Amino acid sequence: MTLISSSSCQTGGTNETSHGCAPRNEAVFFRVNYSGLLIYLCFPSIQIEFFEEKNFQGRSYECSTDNPDLRSFLSRCNSIKVGSGCWVLYEQPNYSGNQYVLSPGEYPELQQWMGFNDSISSCRAVKNVYGKSWKIRFYEKQDFGGRAVECVQDCPSVYEAVKLREFHSCVVMDGAWVLYEQPNYHGHQYFLDRGEYRNYTDWGATSPAVGSFRMITDHKYNPVCVCHLQIVFYEDRDFQGKSYNCKGDSTDLQAFIHRCNSVKVEDGWWVLYERNNFTGYQYIIGPGEYNDFRRWMGFNDCVRSCRIIKNAKGPYKLKLFDRPNFGGNFLEVTENVKSIQEKWLRLEVQSCKVLEGSWVFFEHPNYCGRQYLLEKGEYPHHSQWGALRATVGSIRRILQL
C-alpha cells in the first residue's frame, strides 16, 4: 500500500510524501494493489493550529490528530486556525471540561469560539461529518423513557420547536451533533457522536438543559465566527486616532481602544455595549460610517464590548404583552412601529415573544432613546432584554439589505 498526497482525488499528477506526512490543506489517499487491481481510497486531510496569543501571534502548535494533552506544546490558547476538518476542543486534558466545536476558518480571539477562558488542553477530530444523513432522537427521561423527539436538522430553539427545555437521554442514529445549553447556539456546548446516551451526564453536561442543537458538517457553520463581517473602531472623531479592526464578538475592547468616537461598519449588523461582557447601554448599528458617537445615538464615547447580530433577515414577527409572563392583552407586530402608544394605546411592554427575526426596542417614539436588542426567543420580563423600566416608545426590525 502506497501513501500519496494530492490536492484532489485523481490518479494523475500525484506527489510522493516523505515519512507518510501529507502537505498542508491537501487530501490524502492510499493506492492499494489488490490482486493486480489498483484501488484508490481518498481521505480528506485534517489540520488545526493553536496560538498562545490573540490574532495568531506568539507560540503556536500545529495538530493533525487527536491529542489528549496539549499542555506540553502550549500553555494557553487565544486564537486558532482550522485548516480543514471539524474539531472538538476541551478545556481540560483527556477530553474533559468545557467543550468547543469548531469548523474550518480563522478564530482570532477566544470569544469567537465562545470560549470561557484561554485554556485548551486536549482536542480530537470529528470523524462523522461527511455523510448525507443526520438523525438524532431525544428523550424526556433518562434511559430512553418518556416522550421522544426525533430530529434531522438544526434547531435554534428547542422550546419553540417541541415545548421542552430538558432532555435526559438521547440516541444519535446518524451524523455528529453539537448541543447548546441556550437557544440560538449559545452557552455550553456538548459534542455527540453516533451512539446511545442514557443520561445527560454521558455527553458531559451537568444539567439536562438543551436550548438548541445543530448538525456538524464539513462546511463552515459556527455562528460566532462570521469572518466576512467587520467593524472598525476609532478612538477619535472622523475616523482618526488609534483604531481596532474587529471581525467577531468581543467581550472586552479595552485591550485595543480606550474610547470610541467614530465607527465604520463594513458589513453586518452589530450591537455595541457601553460596558464589558455585553452590559450597559446598547447601540445597534448596521453598515455605514459613523463619524461621531452621536450618529449611533451614543450617550458617551465608551464602547467596551460588541457582538454580531446573527438573524438580520426576515420574516419578522413578535408579540407584545402588557403583563409579565405573557399575560394580559397582546399585540402582534410584523412591521416597524414609530409610536407604540398610538398603535396600542399603551406606554409599557412587560413581556415579549420574538417569533421571527431580530428587533430593536427604543425607549421613546420615533426610534429615539435607549436601545435594546431582542433576538428570537421568549422574554417573560422586561429586565430580560436589559431594560430597567418597561417603557417602549417605538420598535424597529433589524434588516440586512
Image (tube, rainbow, N blue to C red):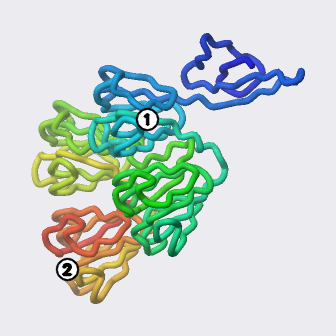
Q: What is the x, y in percent for residue 102?
A: 45, 41
**For mark 2, does the 10 Å Cα neighbourhood hold few (<14), some (14 to 19), or many (20 or more) residues?**
many
State whether residue 123 is above or below residue 162: above
Q: Which residue is identified by label 2?
A: 348
Q: Quadrant of the C terminus?
A: bottom left
Q: Is residue 393 visible?
A: no
| Res 152 quadrant in image | bottom right
Frontmost residue, 190 versus 134: 190
Q: What is the x, y in percent for residue 387?
A: 17, 67
Tag on residue 71? none
State whether residue 320 is above or below residue 101: below
Residue visible at 51% across and 27% down in the picture: 64
Q: Amino acid at mark 2?
A: Glu
78 sits left or right of 162 in the view: left
Sequence order check, earlier mark of 2 and 1: 1
Kindly give the residue lying farthest to the right in the view shown: 36
Q: Which residue is identified by label 1?
A: 123
Looking at the rendered structure, the secondary structure element under dot 1 is strand
State whether residue 314 is above or below residue 260: below
Residue visible at 34% across and 74% down in the picture: 353
Residue visible at 20% across and 57% down in the picture: 282
Frontmost residue, 277 versus 344: 277
Looking at the rendered structure, the secondary structure element under dot 2 is loop
Q: What is the x, y in percent for residue 305?
A: 21, 46
Frontmost residue, 51 versus 93: 93
Q: What is the x, y in percent for residue 360?
A: 28, 64
User: What is the spatial separation of the Cα atoms under label 2 and label 1, in whole angstroms?
Assistant: 49 Å
